[in-house]
Image: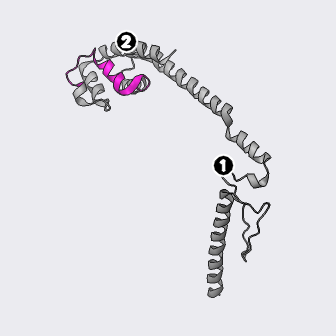
């Protein structure tokens, strides 16, 4: 069912639901609908309120909001739940369908696993390319008592922007280790 067809049927069902509410329940519902300005709600006939609710909340969100509010009022009887439940179910199906379509298109258009596999097939000098969603891979450093102060380049001497950033952070870590070692030695 399309969103337009859902909206048309929902407006009629919402009108039916609002007609079954007592005056105090109707007032309570209007008070809870905080997206709608008070001036738009005040003095309107019950037949006008469904259109206003759908305008401000949209068809999908209005179904969710009305369902939640009917549970809180509480109006769990057949007169209210009868017209409401089919739309709650249709909305749930529509959202699941959209979610499945979105996740399928993401998987088809290039998932992270696919990109990682392609990156693994590339030579090492290309792995830190900017287009890699995971970013540059930082090597794990072993903790030793004496820091290794020499940095040796691996592979190509040409570095991309991602590799130079990793080298810079490595230098900063080395400098921090040096300072910590000096403080430790002076304390001994």
Q: Is residue 174 above or below residue 70?
A: below
Image location of residue 86, percent across then percent down: 47, 15
Secondary element under disc 1, as helix, strand or loop, is: loop
- Residue 151 lies left or right of residue 65; in this view the side is right
Please name the predominant secondary structure of the magenta segment in the image: helix
Image location of residue 54, percent across then percent down: 36, 22
Image location of residue 135, percent across then percent down: 65, 52
Image location of residue 124, percent across then percent down: 78, 54
Q: Inspect this view and state whether residue 112 appears.
A: yes
Q: Inspect this view and state whether residue 79 appears.
A: no
The C terminus appears in which quarter of the rendering? bottom right
Q: Quadrant of residue 27?
A: top left
In the depicted view, which residue is nearer to us: 170 or 29?
170
- Residue 100 lies left or right of residue 36; in this view the side is right
Residue for point 76% across, 66% down: 153
Give the spatial CA distance, label 2 vs label 1.
49 Å
Q: Quadrant of residue 93?
A: top right
Q: Which residues are magenta?
A: 41-62
Q: Going by the picture, which residue comes out furthest to the left?
A: 43
Tell me the crowding category of disc 2: few under 14, some 14 to 19, or many 20 or more residues within 10 angstroms, Cα based.
some
| Residue 42 magenta-highlighted | yes
Question: To which residue does mark 1 refer?
Answer: 134
| Residue 125 magenta-highlighted | no
Q: Earlier in the sequence, mark 2 or mark 1?
A: 2
Q: Quadrant of residue 39?
A: top left
Q: Is residue 120 above or below residue 52?
A: below
Residue for point 66% across, 80% down: 181
- Residue 152 lies left or right of residue 23; in this view the side is right
In the depicted view, which residue is nearer to us: 73 or 126?
126
Tell me the crowding category of disc 1: few under 14, some 14 to 19, or many 20 or more residues within 10 angstroms, Cα based.
few
The disc label shown at residue 12, or none:
2
Mark in front: 2 vs 1: 1
């Amino acid at each position: 069912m399309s969103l337009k067809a859902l909206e048309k049927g929902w407006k009629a069902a919402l009108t039916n639901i609002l007609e079954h509410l007592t005056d105090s329940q109707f007032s309570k519902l209007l008070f809870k609908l905080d997206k709608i300005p008070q001036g738009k709600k005040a003095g309107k006939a019950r037949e006008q309120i469904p259109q206003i609710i759908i305008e401000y909340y949209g068809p999908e969100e209005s179904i969710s909001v009305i369902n939640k509010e009917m549970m809180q009022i509480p109006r769990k009887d057949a007169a209210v739940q009868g017209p409401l439940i089919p739309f709650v179910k249709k909305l749930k199906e529509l959202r699941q369908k959209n979610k499945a379509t979105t996740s399928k298109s993401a998987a088809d258009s290039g998932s992270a696993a696919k990109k990682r596999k392609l990156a693994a097939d590339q030579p090492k000098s290309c792995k830190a390319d900017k287009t890699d969603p995971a970013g540059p891979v930082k090597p794990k450093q072993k903790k030793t008592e004496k820091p290794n102060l020499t940095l040796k380049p691996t592979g190509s001497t040409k570095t991309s922007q991602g590799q130079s950033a990793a080298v810079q952070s490595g230098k900063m870590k080395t400098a921090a280790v040096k300072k910590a070692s000096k403080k430790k030695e002076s304390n001994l």
